[in-house]
Every structure is written in C-alpha cells, then in structure tokens.
Amino acid sequence: MGNTQINPEGNIRMKRIQKSFMLSSSDISKLNKAFNRVDNTRTGKVSLKDIFKGYEIKNWSLLGEALAALVDIELDENEPECIDFPDFAAMILSLCCFEPPELLRFLMYCYDPEKNGYIEIEDLKQLMNNIHGVIPPDTVIGNEKASWSKLEFPANGRLEFDDIVEINGKAPMLLAPAFRFQERVMMKFLGVSYWENKKRILYEGKLKAEAIMAKKKAKKEKKARAGRDRKIKKKMGILRYYCCPCFRTWYDEYAEERLTDEEKAQRARLLRLEQLAAKNPETAAGKKF
C-alpha cells in the first residue's frame, strides 16, 4: 500500500471496512493515495486538521470529532496525529457515503451521542451556530435568522428525527454548511462522481442482500408452516383435516385465537421491532468498525 504502514490490528479493521463498503483493490489503492497526499510527514498517521482543514465550513472540528467518535476512533489531544489509514478510510467512506437522511441523523448524533432519539431545541440552535461558525452570544443573521424565526417547535422542546427532516425541508439554509462540507470532502478525496457511483453500488448491494434475506425468511416460514401442518394433520386425522379446514385453527397451537394475552403482546412487540428495523435499516456508513 505504498508508503502507508498498517499494523496487524489495522489489517483486521481494514478487512471489515473493505467488506462493509464493498471496496475493490482499486478502491483501496485510490484511498491510500488520497491518504498519502495529506500524510506530508510520511509517518503513516495524520490529524483531523490535516484531513478537514481548508473547507467552506468555518468550524469543522465539531463534525470531524463526532465522525471520529462514530467510527470508534479515540482522539488524543496530546498526539493529534493519531489517525492511521484504516481510521482515515472509515471516516472518509462514512461521511462521503451518507445520503441526506443519514447526514441529518449524523448531525443529530453530534448532540445525541447516547442515541436517545431526540435533541433539544437549544441543541439544534447550537448545531446551527456551530456549523455557521457563529460564537455565542452572537447568532446567525440574514436569511438564516429569518428562517429560524419562522419555525414552529414541539411543545415539549424535544426534536426527533422526523422533526429535523421537516425543519431541513422548510429551512434548508440552517444546516446547509454541513451538506457543503460533505460535498467539499467528496471533491477533495476521489471526486463527487466516484462517491455517487460508490453509493449506487452500496444501494444495489443492499437490495441484493435484502432479496437474499427475504428469500431465506420465506423458505424458513414455509418450512415452519409445513411442520405445523404435519402436527395438525396428525391431531385431526387426514379425513377431518381435508374435509373440515375451518377447524384447523382449533388444533394449531400457534393460532392467534389460542394465544394468551401475554403471548399476543410478545408477538406484537416482536412485530413492532421488525417493522422498526425495516424502517431504519443499519447502513454500512452508520456501522462501527
């Protein structure tokens, strides 16, 4: 990998990253060249400043540090140049592969690292001021301030993800610097067209994986139904099974009508968790390595 040296632990981490982001040897080579361009000292390690300095966003440290935390990089104030190639790859791949909803979730994460599912209105204001480079007690001015004043917030003061999406739709200028930051990083490292193609590959891979999982699930359910039917046939007898199909649920221990209230509640809970998992899938860009 050129001038970049990777220790055994880094190799394991790099293999996980390669699998998660479906990286080819060519992809890794390109990322390595990008890393070497910012590794001016050729030590195999760089700092956040080396990676993110010189962008339109006036205060990149918030997003850079949050991104490092998201991918499990422990920053050291006494040794700022502590980011090796696998760390660099994890950060750049995660940030550049974020789709708009994922980037908004990441912005929420900056003030909700414990993933409570919400941030306070004051957190959003601090986020807005931070990425606009505004230092309190000053605040944003012009169109951004006008957009903020027109927003309506929940009475409890808590903003969930859907609220952030709605706010971004009504007042996109408030969080626009974060999107410009992502675009500038994409342009600097490998180019926007590369990242758009990479996101397409990941999306197609996700669809393929979902199709395989759905097929396995259907096969498993079919096998389970066949097993249940065999038990019902044995209990009912062949003649009654085929002549009286409306009575089959009487002999089906898994039938809804025969479940206790506790069993029904458990089934409903599991179904709800399954629906939430489908609604908020874990993406490669959001995984920890």
Image (spheres, helix red, strand yellow):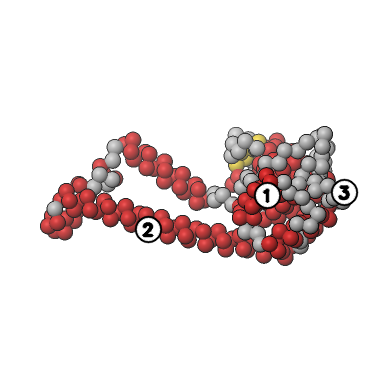
Identify the image quadrant of residue 127: top right
- Identified by mark 2, the residue type is Lys
The nearer-to-camera label among 2 and 1 is: 1
Q: Is residue 16 left or right of residue 221?
A: right
- Identified by mark 3, the residue type is Thr
Dot 2 crowding, Cα within 10 Å, few <14, some 14–19, many 20+: few
For the residue pair 146 and 77, the one nearer the viewer reads as 77
User: How far across and down, in percent of the image, does residue 100 sit?
Assistant: 66, 54
Q: CA distance from mark 3 to mark 2?
A: 55 Å
The nearer-to-camera label among 3 and 2 is: 3
* SS state under label 3: loop
User: How far across and down, in percent of the image, does residue 149 sit?
Assistant: 73, 43
For marks 3 and 1 on the same chain, the one whose residue lies earlier in the sequence: 1
For marks 2 and 1 on the same chain, the one whose residue lies earlier in the sequence: 1
Q: Which mark is residue 41?
A: 3
Identify the image quadrant of residue 261: top left
Dot 1 crowding, Cα within 10 Å, few <14, some 14–19, many 20+: some
* SS state under label 2: helix
Q: CA distance from mark 3 to mark 1?
A: 22 Å
Identify the image quadrant of residue 158: top right
Q: Which mark is residue 219?
A: 2
Q: Which mark is residue 11?
A: 1
Q: How many marks?
A: 3
